[in-house]
Image (spheres, rainbow, N blue to C red):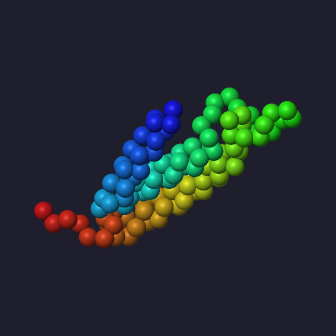
Amino acid sequence: MEAVISLAIGVLAAAGVWLVLRPRTFQVLIGLSLLSYAINLFIFSVGSLSIGREPIVRAGVPADLVNYTDPLPQSLVLTAIVIGFATTALFLVVLLALRGLSGGDHVDGQEEQP
């Protein structure tokens, strides 16, 4: 399970960095989204990767990560997803306005000459 999550985080981060370095603003937007997904998975995996465990401590069971799942990373990831969605929507509106004003969507504002 840890190897699959680590591989998914690595692939998302690598694809995100590659897309952030592209010249078009939409590709940069998608790259930032992939990077945020990778970071969310990383934060989520920090809270222990256990399936079927309660996040609330019960009497008679030792309070360690063997028996429980940490609820704090789950709440942080949920908040990050909501904020990331709002930021992506705002960036899309700004991207459309920029394309309408400048006529292109390159990051540096200049089209490549053929």
Residue 74 seen: yes
46 to 24, vertically: above or below: above
- Residue pictured at 59% horizontal, 47% vertical: 46
- Residue pictured at 62% horizontal, 41% vertical: 48
- Residue pictured at 43% horizontal, 61% vertical: 96
Q: Nearer the viewer, residue 55 or 21?
A: 55
43 to 22, vertically: above or below: above
Q: How many marks?
A: 0
- Tell me where residue 73 appears, x and y as whole percent: 65, 48
* Quarter location, residue 59: top right
What is the residue that sits farthest to the right in this orientation?
Answer: 59
- Tell me where residue 105 appears, x and y as whole percent: 33, 63
Residue 89 seen: no
- Tell me where residue 99 appears, x and y as whole percent: 37, 64
- Tell me where residue 107 appears, x and y as whole percent: 33, 67
Q: Is residue 73 shown left or right of residue 62? A: left
Q: Nearer the viewer, residue 108 or 18?
A: 18
- Residue pictured at 47% horizontal, 65% vertical: 94
Q: Is residue 54 shown left or right of residue 84? A: right
The C terminus lies in which quarter of the figure? bottom left
* Quarter location, residue 97: bottom left
Q: Nearer the viewer, residue 102 or 89?
A: 89
Q: Nearer the viewer, residue 13 or 67?
A: 67
Q: Is residue 68 shown left or right of residue 16? A: right
What is the residue that sits farthest to the top in this orientation?
Answer: 52
100 to 53, vertically: above or below: below
